Image (tube, coloured by chain):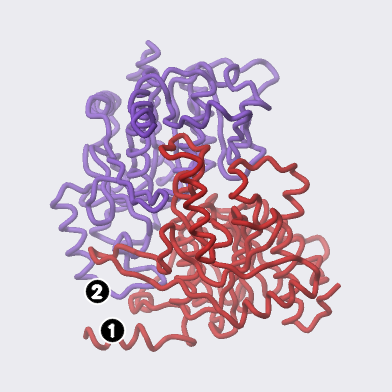
Chain colours: A purple, B red
Amino acid sequence: MALDRHLRIDSQEGISFVRNIHLDSMEEDVLYHLALSNKSHDLKEIFGDVKFVCFGGSPSRMEKFAHYMVDQLKFKLTPGQTLYNISKGSDRYVLYKMGPIISVSHGMGIPSLSILIHEILKLLQHAGCDPSEVVFFRLGTSGGLGLDAGTVVISEAAVDGILRSYMEIPTLGLIIQHPAKLDEALNKELLQISEEIGCKSELGKTMCTYDFYEGQARLDGAFCDYTEEDKLAFLKRAHERGVRNIEMESLCFAAMTHRAGVKSAVLCVTLLNRLNGDQINTPHDVMEEWQARPQRIVAAYIKKKLGMEYKS
Amino acid sequence: MALDRHLRIDSQEGISFVRNIHLDSMEEDVLYHLALSNKSHDLKEIFGDVKFVCFGGSPSRMEKFAHYMVDQLKFKLTPGQTLYNISKGSDRYVLYKMGPIISVSHGMGIPSLSILIHEILKLLQHAGCDPSEVVFFRLGTSGGLGLDAGTVVISEAAVDGILRSYMEIPTLGLIIQHPAKLDEALNKELLQISEEIGCKSELGKTMCTYDFYEGQARLDGAFCDYTEEDKLAFLKRAHERGVRNIEMESLCFAAMTHRAGVKSAVLCVTLLNRLNGDQINTPHDVMEEWQARPQRIVAAYIKKKLGMEYKS
C-alpha cells in the first residue's frame, strides 16, 4: 500500500495537476475559497481551454490585467457582455477568465497563495486541462537589491529568508521540504522577449520571507532591534549571493508548481532599492507604470505563443 | 549602545505600541498597506480615541461587523454620512472606524496579518493612544476538533502545526522565537459574557498553520500522500493535547500583541468538525449566523466596557 501510494504520487507528472488519491472518490469537490465546485459548476465548460494562469497579489491589479489582456489579444467580448469576477461568491480572491487566460489575485504571503494554488490545480484537473500545456505566472511587486526601482526581476531561483531553496510544510508532524525550482528555458525566453519589447528585466535570485518588516531587514516596522549597519550588512551579503529582490510568495509559487509538474515563472517589478531605504513613497502614477511592466512581458509571451505579433 | 538599545526595547511596555528606535527620526511614516501616513493624515484626530481593534480575515465580514457595531452601540451617524473604508486607497485590507472601535480585515495567513499588525501598532502610536487601554480581538473562522460546528473557541493558547507555542521570524539571519501568549483574565471575562448572552463558547488551544490543506491534515487538497487513518491519528493526538480548533493567524496575533504589550483575545467559530470531514458545504445562511457569533460576544464585551446594557 505504501509503495503503491508512492508510485501513484510520482507517476502523475505531466498527466495530472494533482497528487491525491482521495480526490477521485469525493462525491463533490468544493473549491471553497474560490466559491466554485465541480458539482455546482461545469468546470470543463468554463475552464477547459485554459493555457495561461496569471497570479498577482492585488485584486485591483489582476482585474486591470484581465481587461488589459482583452485589449492586447484583441479579444472580442460578446455584445452586451463584460468580464466579471467568477469567484465573486467569495471575497478571498478575484478570478477573471478571458479566452485561454485566467487572471487571479492571491493576497499577501505564502499561506494565502498556497490555498489558492491548491484550489487552482484542482480546478484545472476538474476542467480536464493538460498539465504539459499550461503555464503559471506570478506577476508581482518586490523590494530590489542594487537595482534601479522599476526593474523587473525574473526569478532564476526562490530562496527563503535564510537562503534555503525549499518551502517547508509541517505535514502530520513531519516537516517536509519541497524544492522551489523554476524553469530555466521559460526564463530565458521571457528575458529575450523583455529585451525585444524594450522592458528592462534581469535574472536573479528572489528572497521570499514570511514577514515584510523584520523578515526583510526593514527599519520601519513596529519592532526593530537592529541598526542600519546590521541591516545593510545583511542585505549586502544576500546581494553578494545573487539575491536581486525580496517578496513574500515566490518560494511557495516555485515549490508548488514544481511539485505539480507545471511550468512556471515569477516576474516581479522592484518598487525601491532596499540598499537605499525602506519606505515606498513613489508617486502613484509612476508606481502604476512600474507595476504594468511584468504584465507587458507576460502579455508579449502569451501573444507569441498564440502566434500573434508581440513586439509592438 | 547594545545595552541602551536593549533597555529601550524592554522599557516601553505599557507606554508605547512600538519597539523601534528608528521611528522617531523618520520624517514621514507611510503605512503603505493601509494607504495612510502620519504626514498626509491627522492620525491623532482620526484615531486618537481608539480603544478596541477588531481583526477578521474577510473584508466583507469586517464591513458587516462595522455596521453591526454602529447598530449595537446605538451610535448616531452624522446626517447624510455613512461609514467608509478608510484604507480604500489600498486594496490589501479594509478598515472602518466607528467611535472607539476599529474593524479591519487581515486577509489569510500569518504574513498578511503580520504586515497589518505592524502598521496598526504604528498607527495607534502616531495617534497617541494609550497601550494599556487598548484591546485587540481576532474574530475568525476555523476548523474544530471534537466540537459541534458553530461552537466559538476562545484561544487559551496558540501553537503552530507541531504544537510549538511561539512564532519564528528569521531576522537578519537569526531565527527569533516570539512567545504566543494570550490574556487569561480577558479570556475568563469573555467566556462569562458568552454564557450570559447564550452564545456557546469554549476555551481551548488553537493550532495555527501556514498551510490550509496538508498543514491541517486535510484529504482534499491538490496534494496528499497520507491516508485517512494517518489524518485522524494526527488530529486525535492534537485533540488529546488540548487543541480545539485549527486556523491560520492566531500564533502571529498572540505573539505580536504580547510583544507589543497589548491585551488581546482570539475568538473563532468552528465551521466543521475536522474529526468528521474536511469539506465545508454548510448552507450559506447557517454559516452567516455562525460567523456572527464571535462578533456577538465581542460586541457584548465592548458594550459592557462602555457601561451599556449588554446581556440583551
- The residues tagged by marks 2 and 1 sit, at their Cα atoms, a distance apart of 9 Å
Subunit ID for the residue under disc 1: B
Q: Is residue B311 or residue A264 the one in the foreground?
A: B311
* Residue shown at the point (22%, 52%) measured from the top left: A163
Q: Is residue A152 or residue B186 the one in the foreground?
A: B186
Q: Is residue B27 above or below residue A35?
A: below
Same chain for the residues at labels 2 and 1, yes or no? no
Q: Is residue A41 above or below residue B139?
A: above
- Residue A215, horizontal then vertical, whole percent: 32, 61
Residue furthest out toward the front: A1
Q: Which residue is mark 2?
A: A227
The amino acid marked with disc number 2 is Thr
Q: Is residue A130 above or below residue A214?
A: above
CB within 8 Å, label 2 to label 1:
yes
Residue furthest out toward the left: A240
Q: Is residue A53 left or right of residue A63?
A: left
Residue furthest out toward the top: A307
* Residue shown at the point (48%, 20%) measured from the top left: A50
The amino acid marked with disc number 1 is Arg
Subunit ID for the residue under disc 2: A
Q: Which residue is mark 1?
A: B5
- Residue A302, horizontal then vertical, whole percent: 39, 21
User: Would you say residue A204 is visible in this rendering?
Assistant: yes
Q: Is residue A144 left or right of residue B180?
A: left
